[in-house]
Each structure stands twice: as structure tokens, then as C-alpha cells.
Image (cartoon, rainbow, N blue to C red):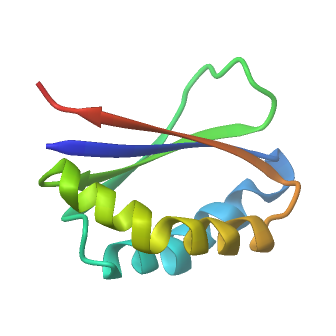
Amino acid sequence: MIVYNETIIVDEAVHRQWLNWMQEQYIPKVMATGHFNRYTILNVLDSPNEGVTYCVQYFADSREHYKRFAEQHLQALQAIHYQQFENQFVLFNTLMQTV
């Protein structure tokens, strides 16, 4: 199983609005690509960063599913994210495999 993880540090002033937008708008668009079979949202406790830190993990059956997602959809989806919450979050991603 491949896990594509997005860690997002969101300004505290907008984190509830951001979370709602993620659940209602962004994540459904990611899932509609058909490359992931499930997702989970985590809130990082005791984060050393300012703001509120979340991890959104998307689960794919293979690295090829993730690769197609990244090639076909990732840039456009991230552009929407940056446009919606410009200068209000920092995002980094990680690709992992379950063992």
C-alpha cells in the first residue's frame, strides 16, 4: 500500500474554515481522480510549529496509481489549494509505503 501524505501547517485564524473546505471541496476532488481508495485526516498534537498542523493521507494500491495522480492532477489541485488559502498555510508532502 502506498501512502501519499500531505502535511499542512495552517494559520490558526483560518484552520476551521480550511478544514471544512478540505473535507467538502478539496479531498472529494482528489478522491474523484480514482487513484486513491481511501484517505484519513490527522491533527498533529504538540506540533512545534505555529498554527495548526494536519496530515492528510491518501492510500493507493500501487506506486503506479500515485505516479499517474501526480502526473495528471497534483499540480492543478495544489494550485487550487494555494489560490484558496494564499499565504495562510505551508505544505510539504511525503510518499510512503506500508511494511
Horizontal side, residue 73 vs residue 20: left or right: left
Q: Residue at x 21, y 44 (%)?
A: 2
Which of the two residues, 28 or 15, is positioned nearer the viewer here? 28
* Residue 69 seen from this side: yes
The residue positioned 36% from the left and 46% from the top of the image is 4
Q: Residue at x 75, y 24 (%)?
A: 49
Which quadrant would residue 92 be assigned to in this image?
A: top right
Which residue is nearer to you in this view: 98 or 62? 62
* Quarter of the figure with the C terminus: top left
Q: Position of residue 44 (x, y in %)?
A: 54, 31
Q: Please identify the quadrant where the N terminus is shown.
A: top left
Q: Report whether 9 appears left or right of 5.
A: right
Task: State the image coordinates of residue 19 (x, y, percent, origin top left).
Answer: 60, 61
- Residue 30's place in the image compared with 55, above or below, is below
Viewer-closest of 20 and 72: 72
Q: Is residue 92 left or right of residue 84?
A: left
